[in-house]
Amino acid sequence: MPREYPAKILLYGEHTVLRSGRGLAVPYPGLSLRWSRSTPDEQLLRFCDYLKIAIPEDVLETGLLEDHLLADWRLTGNIPTGYGLGSSGAVCAAIWSRFATDKGKALSTEDLRNMLARMEQHFHGQSSGTDPLICYLKQPVLLGGGQAPSTTKLPANWDEGFFLLDTGIERKASDFIRSFTFRYDSDAGFAQAINKEWTTNADAAIDALLAGNRKALWEFTARIAEFQIRKFPDFIPAHLHGKWTGKGYLLKLCGAGGGGMMLGLGTDRKLVEEQLGKVHWI
């Protein structure tokens, strides 16, 4: 079972995709999971017990999965948990890829996403199915905006200048999602500011990236970065407040915030690393 199942990065649309905005997520093969033979994985065995109840066996061969797990197959890799990189999504993708039946693999994209959401609920209690879908398809996916998730093509060299900055802090995404939705839903003025200064610029950044317009991409990313540090400083680790923007780079949330990875956009690799230290270039 040599295939690898990548992490995912939400480039734009963090939080706002939950409130009618669009999002753009991509697979990140720099971090991945793969099947290997080692000691039994008790967590995967418990997940298998859940799947036997939650997922019909005519779409997922849970009995075969259990046999493999008892024969010491497990998932290994380097996707950190609590970092917003889709670690549980990669687990679901790896299991679906190996153990889905022909009927399961013939599901439409939307039905597949719903099935993967049911799988991932074991880890989060609630899931959109988007993370495992991206890890399974290994393609960029457009999200939200009133439309079902759909794969998309990105221009050549779209990833130029993008990087991940490790905050060194594991966090629970649900805490920050809950905080955002409460503030958005309870304060009309705050929601209006989000729509005007975050959602609009995130949507425009997605359009700029798809069109290959790097000047516009930088401009809209800068607006998002400025808004986030001004309105959501509690979502940004304190040690990054003074480094949120620098000479030739910008930082923004990557996922829910609070820790994990931050997403950066820079104009010069050497200059970025002189200011921020080692980063993960996408």
Image (cartoon, rainbow, N blue to C red):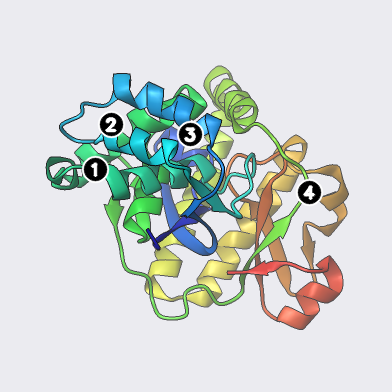
From the viewer's perspective, is the residue at label 3 or at label 4 nearer?
A: 3
Q: Nearer the viewer, residue 223 or 15?
A: 15
- Looking at marks 1 and 2 on the same chain, the residue that comes earlier in the sequence is marked by 2
Can you say whether 214 is above or below 20 in the image? below
Crowding around mark 1 (Cα neighbors within 10 Å: few <14, some 14 to 19, many 20+) is: many
Rendered-image quadrant of the C terminus: bottom right
Q: Is residue 95 visible?
A: yes
Can you say whether 98 is above or below 165 in the image? above
Q: Secondary structure at mark 4?
A: loop
Asked if the residue at tag 4 contacts the one at tag 3, i.e. Cβ–Cβ closer than 8 Å, the answer is: no
In the image, taking residue 4 as reference, residue 275 lies left or right, namely right
Circle 1: residue type? Ala
Which residue is labeled 4 in the image?
168
Which residue is labeled 1 in the image?
100
- Looking at marks 2 and 4 on the same chain, the residue that comes earlier in the sequence is marked by 2
Which residue is labeled 3 in the image?
44
Q: CA distance from mark 3 to mark 2?
A: 13 Å
Name the residue: 35% across, 52% down: 136
Which residue is labeled 2 in the image?
63
Q: Nearer the viewer, residue 234 or 34?
A: 34
Circle 4: residue type? Gly
Name the residue: 51% across, 45% down: 86
Circle 3: residue type? Leu
Q: Is residue 21 visible?
A: no
